[in-house]
Amino acid sequence: MKAPFNEVISGFVSLLTGMGITLGQLFRPIVTVQYPHQTLTMPKRFRGHILLKKEPTTGKSTCVACDLCVKACPSDCILVEGEKKPGEKRKSVTLFELDYTKCSLCGACVEVCPVDALEYSRAYNLASTSKQEYKVMDLVKRLEDSKHP
Amino acid sequence: MLKVLDTSHSTGPQETFVLNLGPQHPATHGVLRVKLTMDGEFITNAEIVCGYIHREHEKMGENRKWDQFLPNTSRIDYLSAMMYTHAYVAVVEKAAGIQVPRRAEYVRVLTSEMNRITSHLLWWGAFLIDLGGLTPMLYAFDDREMVLDLLEALTGARLTFCYYRFGGLCDDVTDDFLTGTRKFVKHFRPRLKIFRRLVTDNIIVRKRLEDLGHVPAEMCRKYGATGPMIRGAGVAYDVRRAEPYSVYPELEFDIPTQPAGDNMARYLVRMAEMEQSLRIIEQTLDKMPDGPFMAKVPRILRPPAGDYVFAVESARGRFEVRVVSSGKEIPHRVRLRSPCFCNLSVFEEACRGMLLADALALMGSIDLVIPDIDR
Ligand code: SF4
Ligand code: SF4
């Protein structure tokens, strides 16, 4: 007869402890972010998809189309073409396509680039109605369209 | 309480039926299927069908250059990404004879232990959801989020960190990260006490876990179950002590064990492990040496021909990588020994005669990550 009685008591104590802790939490500051009204800024090292960096003086990319990133990429998702313009010492990039559907955001391309021409984007809210938009991302065009230095 | 199937007294016809648990079932936390032969509410036999998320990681390792396999290592057991990457970089460092700077080793241990805490917190929340309690998950995720934010600021990713490189790290730790980690340690100790009062001492949890789901040490040995499974059966087996690697020998920590071998024992082991991880984190923060975070490594790696093995203690147990090099740019063989596969194989034998609801508690206490089973 005693055991069930003890159980009722300890069950009641458990219940009260739980409720006490919950009540205490009620007065702690809110930890959630009211997305989409509020968003977080991504940290500096955040690895989004890659972008061609803009050289501040020329407004162009420094990429020399050396194909090192193409070879380093484990997922085979970069296509680079370049040409040597008359009067220039090195090649310059004419086409840089990223297949973002295959990219594993590993950063191998960014690390391998000898002229530091790539950076990560901070975009994380990526959505589209067509797969094609991410299948072929023209980074040269993006660079030309981007307004910020 | 009736725990083991006893049909001796029944006179009716013996009829069993097959119940499919999964492949899409919330309690399996992924695509795992278990064919249960049921006698009423009791399980008479269980057959595990896995392979639904098989991605051929081993083969992927064998058809790309050594460093190109690095992103895969965070995607096998995505909750122990740091430890898994550690195992792979360490085996290649061993093969190629690369000496890792001490600072890098300390950071590796520090981030691995933080990763262990996030993994155990996620398990804690998900396990209690399996048992029918939703609120603890929110507490767990509150704290887990703090660690993930720190790791995100450090590595750039929240889950698939891919932070280690052959010979060190991809980037040095920042002061913000170190102070943030210290703050987290201070914050998390009292939280563990709250968790204990809220859940561990709760009578409902105790009734659902204690004395149920016995996995004795012999059974663990038979199937190769490691990690909290075997420590919950009273065996103090931990790769960090049994085959010391990195700077673990320089750090002080205990290996929590529980003799009972039931669900509660595994639960308590994991809760105690989080405390030990905090201890390790504190020590690494205090002892963090200055210096380079990356060794000089040739751009194209061709480790000398041979057979190399390296094991780490992941959040779920012993994870071992074996690579065979033929002296080329591409590994000849990459073999991954994952803890979840062995831990899961215990389930067939351990769940026999249990009630279905208790077997789900047992499955939760094993702490499965399905991609780790299938690889
Ligand atoms: S981040 Fe990795 S997967 Fe993505 S494009 Fe660069 S190298 Fe390829
Ligand atoms: S981005 Fe860098 S690595 Fe890639 S082709 Fe251009 S210069 Fe070479």
Image (tube, helix red, strand yellow):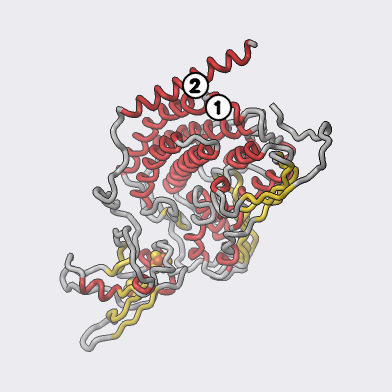
Residue pointed to by mark 2: A14
Residue A108 at what x, y percent from top left?
41, 65
Residue flagged by tag 2: what amino acid is it?
Answer: Ser
Task: Name which residue lies at 55% across and 17% down.
Answer: A8
Identify the image quadrant of residue A49. Answer: bottom left
Q: Is residue B185 visible?
A: yes
Q: Is residue B313 visible?
A: no
Q: Determine contact: label 2, label 1, CB under 8 Å.
A: yes
Ligand 2 image-quadrant field: bottom left
Residue pointed to by mark 1: B204
> Is disc 1 on the same chain as disc 2?
no
Q: Chain of mark 1?
A: B
**Is residue B48 or residue B237 the one in the foreground?**
B48
Q: Secondary structure at mark 2?
A: helix
**Is residue A71 or residue A12 the one in the foreground?**
A12
Q: How far apart in space, not on screen, are marks 2 and 1 (Cα)? A: 8 Å
Residue B270 at what x, y percent from top left?
54, 35
Q: Residues within 10 Å of mark 1 (few under 14, many from 20)?
A: some
Task: Name which residue lies at 27% across and 75% down.
Answer: A140
